[in-house]
Image (tube, rainbow, N blue to C red):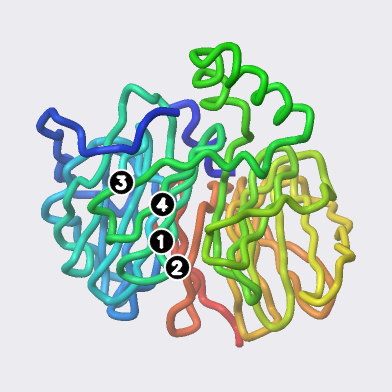
């Protein structure tokens, strides 16, 4: 899980921090530092990581560091709604955005007092987006991030927790505020699926929304551990997480298949390669292949955690704990 990688290193609607931000430090080898996420904007690649690092490339070979990034926190996720408009999030609930394809960034939110990381960010278009993270962190915007509104997703509570909070809200408002900041599990990933939005996280959390995030429904638990990755396509939904636990199902089915796995490497990200061939990128340099109902794996010699990847020109470009790595793929 990404959070395990960076863990060592709720309040009113948020606003931009008042203090002047610390800008990311320029580094000659920025493409060789810890990188946690990477995306293809349509015009090029953008990766983010340690100490506010943002790097861009047109060809996956030559990388340049972004000119202006107003944070030094560990950035954990990046998403673009178009070739020019993108957002990244990270520790201290930090959110930054760009309107020039990733060369320059602007601070939209920073909440160091929260001491919680944002773990994923997703935009449906240039106005509507979501940022999720530790202990049920859930922010939503409908104006491109000019204002991020915090939401508490009480529909994802267990019934006994909801009753407990209802009682606190009536008899101990301060206790209620404290409990709502930590009672929900970590939200690790939010993605668009073929049927709506899906959210996965700690303690087997899986939830879906069919109305663009307005309401959320918790799915029946299929596994008590944490999920860090999900993907949807070709009529399939796949979720994966701790120690190589991988589940998949057809979108019209309620039955999840748990794949037997001899390699206990935590899966951080899932990407599609040639339709029904899925690559599951994991810790310890492991890449799982899910194809034709079979789960296999390969071991990279460097043993470095792979946090995310994109495919361009039959090359897998990976964001790893040791920077950018590139692997040739066979169609």
At label 3, counting other C-alpha atoms closer than 10 Å, the crowd grade (few under 14, some 14-19, many 20 or more) is many
**Label 4 or label 1, whichever comes before in sequence order:** 1
User: Going 48% across and 75% down the picture, which residue do you hit?
Assistant: 311
At label 4, counting other C-alpha atoms closer than 10 Å, the crowd grade (few under 14, some 14-19, many 20 or more) is many
Q: What whole-number distance in Å separates the C-alpha atoms at marks 4 and 3?
A: 12 Å
- Tag of residue 317: 2
User: Going 24% across and 36% down the picture, which residue do you hit?
Assistant: 72
**Label 2 or label 4, whichever comes before in sequence order:** 4
Query: SS of the residue at dot 1?
Result: strand
Residue 192 position within the rendered picture, expressed as x and y whole percent measured from the top left: 55, 68
Considering the image in quadrants, where does the C terminus appear? Answer: bottom right
Query: SS of the residue at dot 3?
Result: strand
Residue 8 position within the rendered picture, expressed as x and y whole percent measured from the top left: 48, 26
At label 1, counting other C-alpha atoms closer than 10 Å, the crowd grade (few under 14, some 14-19, many 20 or more) is many
- Tag of residue 95: 3
Is residue 94 or residue 47 the one in the foreground?
A: 94
- Tag of residue 170: none
For disc 4, the marked residue is 140
**Label 2 or label 3, whichever comes before in sequence order:** 3
Q: What whole-number distance in Å separates the C-alpha atoms at marks 4 and 1?
A: 22 Å
Q: Do the residues labelled 2 and 4 touch (CB within 8 Å)?
A: no
User: Going 80% across and 60% down the picture, which residue do you hit?
Assistant: 247
Q: Left or right: where does residue 277 sit relative to residue 256?
A: left
């Amino acid at each position: 899980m990404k959070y395990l990688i960076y863990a060592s290193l709720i309040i009113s609607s948020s606003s931009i921090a008042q203090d002047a931000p610390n800008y990311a430090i320029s580094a000659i080898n920025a493409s060789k530092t810890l990188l946690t996420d990477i995306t293809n904007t349509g015009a090029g690649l953008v990766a983010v990581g340690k100490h506010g690092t943002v790097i861009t490339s047109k060809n996956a070979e030559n990388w340049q560091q972004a000119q202006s990034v107003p944070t030094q926190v560990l950035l954990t996720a990046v998403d673009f709604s178009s070739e020019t408009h993108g957002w990244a999030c990270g520790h201290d609930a930090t959110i930054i955005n760009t309107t020039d394809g990733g060369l320059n960034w602007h601070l939209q939110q920073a909440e160091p007092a929260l001491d919680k990381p944002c773990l994923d960010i997703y935009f449906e278009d240039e106005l509507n987006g979501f940022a999720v993270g530790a202990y049920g962190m859930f922010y939503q915007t409908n104006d491109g991030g000019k204002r991020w509104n915090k939401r508490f997703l009480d529909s994802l509570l267990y019934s006994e927790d909801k009753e407990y909070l209802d009682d606190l809200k009536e008899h101990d408002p301060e206790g209620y505020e404290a409990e709502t900041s930590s009672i929900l599990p970590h939200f690790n990933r939010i993605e668009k699926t073929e049927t709506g939005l899906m959210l996965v996280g700690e303690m087997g959390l899986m939830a879906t929304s069919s109305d663009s995030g307005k309401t959320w429904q918790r799915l029946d638990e299929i596994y008590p551990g944490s999920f860090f990755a999900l993907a949807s396509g070709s009529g399939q939904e796949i979720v994966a997480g701790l120690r190589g636990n991988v589940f998949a199902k057809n979108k019209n089915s309620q039955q999840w298949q748990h794949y037997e796995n001899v390699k206990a490497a935590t899966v951080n990200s899932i990407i599609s390669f040639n339709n029904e061939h899925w690559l599951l990128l994991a810790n310890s340099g492991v890449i799982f292949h899910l194809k034709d109902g079979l789960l296999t794996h390969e071991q990279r010699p460097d043993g470095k955690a792979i946090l995310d990847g994109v495919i361009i020109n039959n090359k897998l470009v990976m964001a790893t704990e040791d920077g950018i790595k590139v692997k040739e793929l066979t169609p």
